[in-house]
Amino acid sequence: MKVAIVHYWLVGMRGGERVLEELCTLYPQAVIITHVVDRAAISDRLRRHEIRETAIARMPGARKHYQKYLPFMPRALEMVDMSEFDLVISSESGPAKGIICRPDAVHVCYCHSPMRYIWDHFHIYRAGAGRLTRAAMPLIAHKLRIWDVTTAMRVDHFVANSRFIAQRILSYYRRDAEVIAPPVAVEQFHLAPPEEVGSHYLMAGELVHYKRPDLAIEAFNRNGLPLRVIGGGERLEALRKIAGPNITFLGKVPFEQLKREFARCKALIFPGEEDFGIVPVEVMAAGRPVIAYGRGGALDSVLPGVTGELFAEQSVDSLIAAIARFEAGLAQDIDPPALRRHAEGFSAVLFRARMQAAIDGAIAAKRECGKIRQVV
């Protein structure tokens, strides 16, 4: 088979690009198709593949300002000649699944999320946009939504990275999706000796509004428990100003220090709503539990009373109550090896096996459909 993997853009190495790396491991001869690529910002594993860009890459300043060309990406995708490919895997979070394949080709879409900026996060993105962008967004988003729903019919089989994203796919596209969690590098994390585990809590990640770090700061201001905060972002300075003396900001830290912090905290605080949430699984791979907001992808990894606690509302009171439940319950009987075993269920090896099975199933279903049509 000739295989193509379509990824929205390649300008860094985040969760979506880690999924892409594992897909490339499954299909080492695959051609990568993307709107723009910054080769200096991607891994050697990806650079080893043939990478083709769409017409977006020829736009002025596209590698830095690619998101400004979002309205042109649907047409750029549809102009790509895909006639040589038997299997197409789209990695969808920005425009990727709208590629036009041969009728007999198989198209499997691994969906990190339907485009947030035109669906449920539209008003959040618009509120933070500049005046001209804010004025243009309603018309652009309306047209993109029509295209996005229409192109969902070009996909033979959807795979979602969490039950939360499967629900979004059903709501917006009216399509069912198989759920396969993204790969987590659990082998890179290790348990700490019990005597090295501290009494402090930890929050890690970009300090941006939608991740709701303010909830954790306010909660720990009120309960007085020690909290360490890892990460930078637009809210960092504002959060520093309101934080009490029991809260320590570490900023961005090297990966080796990050691993030590994960293994030595009492528990991770995860107050945002994420599509999946890789950090909670990494912390569990280091043997520590997680206190998370009970919506989004955290529901697929955090088991109340077993691997952590969930709080039902994105409010300070709800988070404080969850911490109190944790202190009175699971905190007394944490089993780090059990947490580690739970995290190993999200390994890259299992991701590849599950994706291979899903792709093989989609190919078999397409062939069977072709046989039925021939008989008819």
Image (spheres, rainbow, N blue to C red):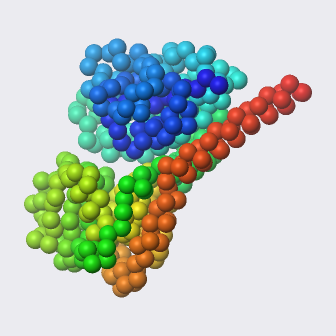
Residue located 26% across and 55% down the image: 256
Residue located 51% across and 16% down the image: 80
Q: Please give left or right for residue 324 compared with residue 151 in the image.
A: left
Observer-nearest of 227 and 169: 227
Q: Is residue 256 above or below residue 76?
A: below
Give the image quarter of residue 141: top left
In percent of width and height, residue 314 lies at 35, 64
Q: Is residue 222 above or below residue 313?
A: below
In percent of width and height, residue 297 lies at 46, 56
In percent of width and height, residue 9 lies at 39, 29
Observer-nearest of 161 and 194: 194
What count of labels does the image hold?
A: 0
- Residue positioned most to the front: 193
Give the image quarter of residue 222: bottom left
Residue located 69% across and 22% down the image: 103
Residue located 42% across and 59% down the image: 281
Q: Is residue 239 above or below residue 2?
A: below
Give the image quarter of residue 64: top left
In percent of width and height, residue 99 lies at 54, 24
Asked if residue 57 shows in the view, the reply is yes
| The C terminus sits in image quarter | top right
Observer-nearest of 368 and 125: 368
| The N terminus sits in image quarter | top right
Observer-nearest of 274 and 17: 17
Asked if residue 122 shows in the view, the reply is no
- Residue positioned most to the right: 375
